[in-house]
Image: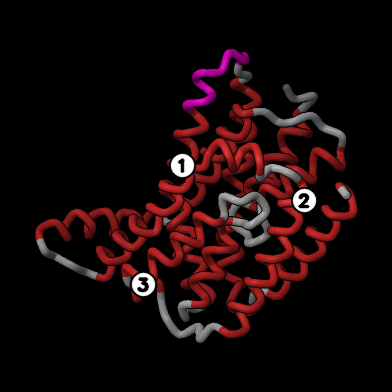
Amino acid sequence: MFVDAVQIVVLALVQGVTEFLPISSSAHLILAPAILGWPDQGLAFDVAVHVGSLSAVMLYFRQEIARMTIAGLGSFAGRWSPDAKLAWAVVLGTLPVVFVGLLGKSFIETALRGPLVIAISTIVFGCALWWADVTGRRDRSEYTVSWRDALFVGVAQAIALIPGTSRSGITITAALLLGLSREAAARFSFLLSIPTLMASGVLVGRDLLESKVPVAWGELALGMLVAAVSAYACIHLFITLVARTGMLPYVIYRLALGFLLLWIFL
């Protein structure tokens, strides 16, 4: 239950921005209420902002999605194009997180939700992002991703089920280690988020339908809209600027955030 619209807007902004930046949305969603003294936002809100983020990434990549869908269907008739290969790479990259999520959902939601886990994950995988950015060749596009590459990034995405890891952060890290450019790593990570967010929305939505808690549809609509707009702007700015900024600003931010969480919760 929200106190007012300010809480809805702030948390939706946090979710929309941090979902696609490599800085861990889970760390921010635990930190914001803790600092501001707000209660847990609830399951319904999580569903709404996930739908907002999904809407943003699908709108931003609408042309790529259309090409990949048509080409992917054409692959069944033996017509293999770069778009078809990319479509299947996204499918393959999604399988590990679905498998691990289904098997480990209850363990992840109980044993790994603590602030200490989030703080350590934020720091450790922030350092991994820096290492990948420094050592990666950065000379490949997302259209060169093989099935082995896709599974490698997919396994990394499954690790992101650990809170604090950052789904976008670890998939970009894996893609950079494979030699993708910063822009290509970001684009592949964002395309990979689409089926993942869909699956997450379905699972959490199912839990919401089974819940007896009343749903405040107006509040959820506001949260979804704010998350969608902020996520769309974040995707555009990140892809536009990442070649120039590199990953160091996000690494520094992650380290500062991780140590702040340790200071607050230890």
- Magenta segment, which residues? 206-214
> Separation of disc 1 and disc 3 at Cα?
27 Å
Taking 90 as reference, is 101 left or right?
A: right
Disc 1 element: helix
> Separation of disc 2 and disc 3 at Cα?
35 Å
Residue pictured at 18% horizontal, 67% vertical:
80
- The reply to whether residue 59 is in sight is no
The disc, 1 or 3, on the residue closer to the chain's N-terminal end is 1
Q: Which mark is residue 14?
A: none
Residue pictured at 38% horizontal, 65% vertical:
150
Magenta run includes residue 211: yes
* Residue 219, x across and y down, in percent: 65, 25
* Residue 172, x across and y down, in percent: 54, 67
Work out which residue is located at the far left of the displayed protein and give it.
Answer: 77
* Residue 18, x across and y down, in percent: 65, 53
Relative to 218, residue 266 above or below:
below
What crowding class fits label 3: few (fewer than 14 Cα within 10 Å), some (14-19), or many (20 or more)?
many
Give the color scheme: rainbow, by chain, secondary structure or one colour: secondary structure
* Residue 112, x across and y down, in percent: 66, 45
- Of tags 1 and 3, the one toward the viewer is 1
Quadrant of residue 8 within the rendered picture? top right
Taking 75 as reference, is 231 left or right?
A: right
Hey, what amino acid is under mark 1?
Leu
Hey, what amino acid is under mark 3?
Val
Residue pictured at 44% horizontal, 41% vertical:
199
> Dot 3 corresponds to which residue?
145
> Dot 2 corresponds to which residue?
116
- Quarter of the N terminus within the rendering: top right
Q: Which mark is residue 103?
A: 1
Disc 2 element: helix
The disc, 2 or 3, on the residue closer to the chain's N-terminal end is 2
The disc, 2 or 1, on the residue closer to the chain's N-terminal end is 1
